């Protein structure tokens, strides 16, 4: 994935439950963008289709950017076989949660300890 600068809050915004453990209810666009790029790189999704899906989600309130909504939006663009593979990738969506990976790397790196 090509690194890109995030300029807007909606790229990382998500809705979570109000009670512990504060489970995420929606997905940030940065995660969805990475997932769509994966579908493109595997040849399952045309770049124009990925752009259409992303534009639809970007036009929605961030709390509506959910995996079920993503699945619905992808449906018309995927063959039956590609749809099955896309659902396999969604079943393990953790790999696309870049901001979670960033947090883990930050904590494991303990950069604050090196500064003192």
Image (tube, rainbow, N blue to C red):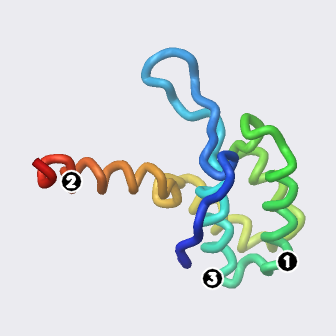
Q: Is residue 79 left or right of residue 116?
A: right
Q: What residue would you read off at disc 1? A: 48
Question: Going 54% across and 54% down the picture, which residue do you hit?
Answer: 93
Q: Is residue 97 left or right of residue 7?
A: left
Compare residues 52 and 6 and report the one nearer the observer.
6
Q: What residue would you read off at disc 2? A: 111
Which SS class for mark 1?
Answer: helix
C-alpha gap between disc 2 and disc 1: 40 Å
Question: Going 79% across and 61% down the picture, which residue do you hit?
Answer: 54
Percent x, y of residue 28: 63, 48
Res 42 quadrant in image: bottom right
C-alpha gap between disc 3 and disc 1: 13 Å
Which SS class for mark 3?
Answer: helix
Percent x, y of residue 90: 60, 56
Compare residues 55 and 88 and report the one nearer the observer.
55
Residue 58 numbered tag:
none
Q: Nearer the viewer, mark 3 or mark 1?
A: 1
Res 41 quadrant in image: bottom right
Residue 41 numbered tag:
3
Percent x, y of residue 114: 12, 54
């Amino acid at each position: 994935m090509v690194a890109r600068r995030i300029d807007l809050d909606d790229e990382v915004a998500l809705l979570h439950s109000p009670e512990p453990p504060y489970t995420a209810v929606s997905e940030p666009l940065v995660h969805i963008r990475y997932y769509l790029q994966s579908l493109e790189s595997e040849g399952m999704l045309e770049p124009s289709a990925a752009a259409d899906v992303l534009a639809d989600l970007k036009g929605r309130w961030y709390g509506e950017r959910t995996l079920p909504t993503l699945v619905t939006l992808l449906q018309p663009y995927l063959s039956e076989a590609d749809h099955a593979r896309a659902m396999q990738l969604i079943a393990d969506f953790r790999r696309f949660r870049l901001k979670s990976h960033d947090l883990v790397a930050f904590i494991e790196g303990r950069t604050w300890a090196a500064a003192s």
